[in-house]
């Protein structure tokens, strides 16, 4: 929830109980089924952020018969970004 608060500039007193409950359902299903891969970002030994890849299927095409696609989302704390932690994430995912 900390990442969502930072990304969407939400006040600390914003009620996130429903979002947290639904997020737990999403991650429980999606991580176990392989529909989502989560990762942590480090700058040296310090935790700097997190992210994930959400996989989804589209209609098969001749150039992509498996039709498996994904999108990457990440958040790197400002201190981690200043230390260069976000550069390797963008190149490797």
Image: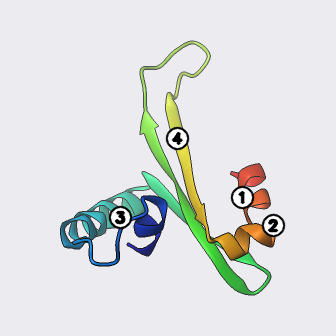
Q: Is residue 58 above or below residue 93?
A: above
Counting from the top left corner in percent of width and height, residue 65 is at 54, 22
Kindly identify which numbered label has been placed on residue 84: 2
For mark 3, what is the residue?
27
Mark 3 or mark 1: which comes first in sequence? Answer: 3
Left or right placement of residue 66 versus residue 91 in this view:
left
Label 3, secondary structure: give it.
Answer: helix
How far is disc 2 from disc 1 in space, using C-alphas?
Answer: 10 Å
Q: Do the residues bearing badges 2 and 1 touch, measured as CB atoms within 8 Å? A: no
Residue furthest to the bottom: 45
For mark 1, what is the residue?
89
Label 2, secondary structure: give it.
Answer: loop
Q: Is residue 53 above or below residue 83?
A: above
| Residue located at (42% from left, 51% from top) | 35
| Residue located at (35% from left, 64% from top) | 27
| Residue located at (52% from left, 64% from top) | 38
Q: Do the residues bearing badges 2 and 3 touch, measured as CB atoms within 8 Å? A: no
Mark 2 or mark 3: which comes first in sequence? Answer: 3
């Amino acid at each position: 929830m900390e990442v969502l608060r930072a990304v969407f500039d939400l006040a600390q007193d914003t009620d996130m109980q429903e979002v947290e409950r639904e997020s737990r359902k999403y991650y429980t299903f999606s991580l176990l089924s392989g529909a989502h891969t989560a990762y942590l970002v480090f700058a040296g030994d310090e935790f700097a952020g997190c992210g994930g890849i959400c996989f989804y299927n589209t209609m098969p095409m001749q150039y992509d018969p498996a039709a498996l696609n994904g999108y990457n989302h990440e958040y790197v704390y400002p201190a981690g970004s200043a230390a260069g932690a976000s550069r390797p994430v963008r190149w490797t995912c």
